Amino acid sequence: MKKALALLLALTMIFALCACGQQAKSEEIIINFPSVWVGTDSKAPYMEQLIAQFNEENAGKIKVVVEEQTDYQAARDKLRTTITTGNTPDLCILDTTYDIKGYTESGKFMDLAPYLAEGWGKDFADGSYDAWSVDGKVCFLPFESAVFTPIYNTKIFADIGWDHFPATYDEFFQFCEDAKAKGYNAMGQMAGENAWSSMLWYSLIVEAIGGKDVYADGLKNPAFVQAAEVLKQMYDYTFDGALSAGAGDVNGHWLARDTAIYLNGPWWVANLYKEDNAVDGVLLADDCEVALNPTYTGGKGEGGLVTTVQAFLAAAEQSDPAKKEAVVKFIKYITDPQHVSELALSSGAMFFVKYEPSADTNLISQKLTGVANDAAYTIIHVNGAFPTAFSTEFPDAVQQLIGGQVDAQGFVDLLQTAIDNAA
Amino acid sequence: MKLERSDRAPLWAFLTPAVVLMVVFFVIPVLYVVGISFFKWNGIGPATFNNVKNFTLLFKDKAFTRSILNNVIWALVAGFIQVPLAMVMAIILSRKPKGWKFFRTVYFFPQVISGIALATLWRAVYNAETGLLNGLLNVIGRGDLACDWLGGIKTAFPAVLIYWIFYIGYYMVIMMADITTIDESYYEAATIDGATDFQQAIHITIPLIRRTSLLTCVTLASVMGLRQFEQVYMLTNGGPANTTSTIVLYMYKRLQDSNYGMAGASALILIIIGVVFIICIRKLFEGRSETMAPGKRRAGK
Amino acid sequence: MSETRVRPALQGKELILALLRWILIIFFAVYTLFPLIWLVISSLKTNFEFLAASPFTLPAVPQWQNYINALTVAGLGRMLLNSVIVGLAATVINVVVASMGAYCISRFRFRGRERIFTLFTAGILVPLNALMVPYFVIINKLGLYNTYGGMILLYCAIGIPMSTFLIRGLMDSIPMELEEAAYIDGCGFFGRFFHIILPLSRTGIVTAATFQFLTCWNEFVFANLIVSSEKLRTIQVGIRYFTNQFSTDYVSMYAAIVISIVPSIIGYVLFQEQIIAGMTSGAVKG
């Protein structure tokens, strides 16, 4: 036993030493790219193929090394730490919860505006990147978009006796009553984890009440208080235990066909078409229909859509011009309309790059694109519209609202305090 | 032992590696955190001196004061309920009942399983609709007690705390190892005097491990209670309404906000509370007179 | 150890106590085995079964595919190896350094001893999440980012307070007379350490080593932070290969978890016999 241990130890040391000795030696430019589009992510298969193809085309000159980051929260923690300590990755994927203004002003990120001005910018939807520029600098390039609009189960609707999706929130709650009477959950809410579903519903209600300019005065707009009342009411029509529920619970109920309405981003569409989720051989997608956010009586919203920038591409500032060119080349490669079209087809996700959708696109995705194109205006979801402290506080605020510790005004106050403390 | 001249050089040679690691990985980083706690810093712009504002903000925040309360409860329950339970089991198993080796191994399993698995399991147990706990209550005819355990303001914290209490494996193993070193002749003498197992435990075993492994375990368990993070993060993320929040979880959330100043301040407060705890526990265990000097027991033969 | 006590037939109070004892033993066994069994059963379901049905039912058809997924898709084999390398190296170095330190603190009186001891104890309390930024900087500055060396060093260091605490606790209970006698016999600093203190504090060392190894094995935050290459990823990173922002493949994740705990359990069962052997010999020497 002792000998075996000693041997094991010696081997370990040798291994450790060997690993220390490994160093890159070629002239190749290495681009390190921590990516969350790996593992079980719907964009993973095509991204892997795309990057391999890029590396092959640039063999000996540029090599993109992907650092697989599957755990989303851990990926965020690491990105924040690397950026703070001045080790920003060559290319990273960020979302709206990062301090975009501060990051842009810090000079740690590469300004892509000159390259976009050279004509590359025409590939992107009008104004998409201008909206995120700071003093003319485009460090955060909006890449993946998302629309949030309800999807409903027509079979359940028929069972409840409804042939259409409610057009107003008054009608919506009538539907909820009918659903409840038939033993269905009208929709899935969750206040556990990051309260994702409730955050999306809240955004939808905020849009319906406050309209296009709801974010103009921060949380001061009365729409936020009113919307909190509506959100609270919705909790009467969701499954038991929503207060502690997570994404797994919401998805589980929707898959179990006991919930009438589902709200999530377009990346979820692929799951509707999965054989694994079919019941008696019928795909869930065959019973699904895309709906629009109901309007609110007396509200300012009309034909608006809640969206977000699901992912920005941002590159670290480079001192070496050759490396700078290499990084830009890679970003252009990823955002190439042809590649994005394929990526959209394979994943169901939506993008800011203008592309010709493939004829093979599934029906639900097509409808979602239609909804996006027809929208009178768009607003971003609440997590994206406010600083990170808002999204950290949101689950807790919802729990207090539903639990009755605070009223609607108190709910908004909690969020405001959180933002103030962090500012 | 008094330090002899010839021992001085080797002593420092022995101490240096540990001290260097401590300085590099604890003293310097903690000083950095302490420093940051007096600043306002978002991790990207310049840091500005903030005096004690981070601390006043912390104590104004109900979520933080609730976290402190939770941690203190947690530490007390861990030290004074969980460890005594572990001690009882250690005493029982060290009497070598049938299959004791098997049980000793099995009790340790939860320590080996990764935290994610335990958290998902207990989320499932406490689930309002499909949960095992509500199922059991229905079976025994107390379905009226069924509820959303992790979602209720009153039930969430006890639920998170109680399932944890019974994972005693680690402390039990430490104390069992200690109990096994007690000289068998004490028990032989006691048995001849007609003392029952229970009396032997009270008069021999517990006094003998009190200042060694029992003290170690109580300290350890309390510290673990104060540092509680992973399970709460995955079970409830501090909810509902912060009733299950802990200091480390609170700190982690401030880090997510890139609010490094308040994160540092909460870390500092945790360390201070911990030091107070450790001192109190030592005082408690050293305070009362000892019937038998702990060092003596192995010299029985 | 021989059974020398004579047990009279159980009666009355004794019987109740014996019954109570077995109730406790069985309760804890069920309580601790339950997560493991649940995990194995869950790992054999489909995601649809896991999400849409009750979590406490049996799978219709056991999905061994999940295990194949875990092993091939996530590349768990390599990760297990990395975890073993890092875990063993960090544990051995940690325990050696900690026992040397604990020996000095426990057995000698010198200036600064109290301060050093306080420092070590306070170290147990530090919430490591708060130190992500400084640790990242330190590992980078040492040129150890993305190396086994970096992980080993960091794991070894973060476990020092706990290991020292555990080992010192045991060393404190070794009678001074033993060491003093050896000293009079002409036994030097090292002699006393290797021949008297180390063998007698074996239980403490093994306890610390177990704790340290499990900490390394289950550590995730820093494993992800200070390593970027797939080749160096450890098992905890592998387990999270199946989680994602919006779609977690729960069942494959459970399969990965089962795979990750099997070596720990086997290692523990094997090692446990060594603990007992160590303790018995220690007792005889005493």
Image (cartoon, coloured by chain):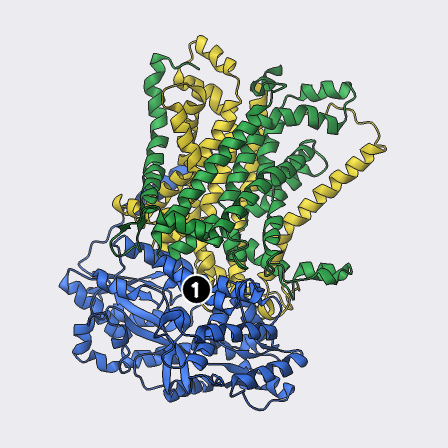
Whether B235 is drawn above or below C4: the answer is below
| Quarter occupied by the C terminus of chain C | top right
- Name, please, the residue furthest toward the left: A321
Task: Judge by depth and name the residue closer to the eye, C176 or C7.
Answer: C176
Q: Chain C colour?
A: yellow
**Element on which disc 1 rests:** helix
Task: Judge by depth and name the residue closer to the eye, C16 or B268.
Answer: B268
Chain ID for blue: A
Whether C229 is drawn above or below C112: the answer is below
Q: Residue at x 45, y 62 (%)?
A: A414
Of all chains, the one bearing label 1 is: A
Q: Which residue is drawn at 61% across and 32% down?
A: B176
Q: Which residue is drawn at 49% across and 60% down?
A: C70
Q: Quadrant of residue A346?
A: bottom left
Chain ID for green: B
Whether B135 is drawn above or below A296: the answer is above
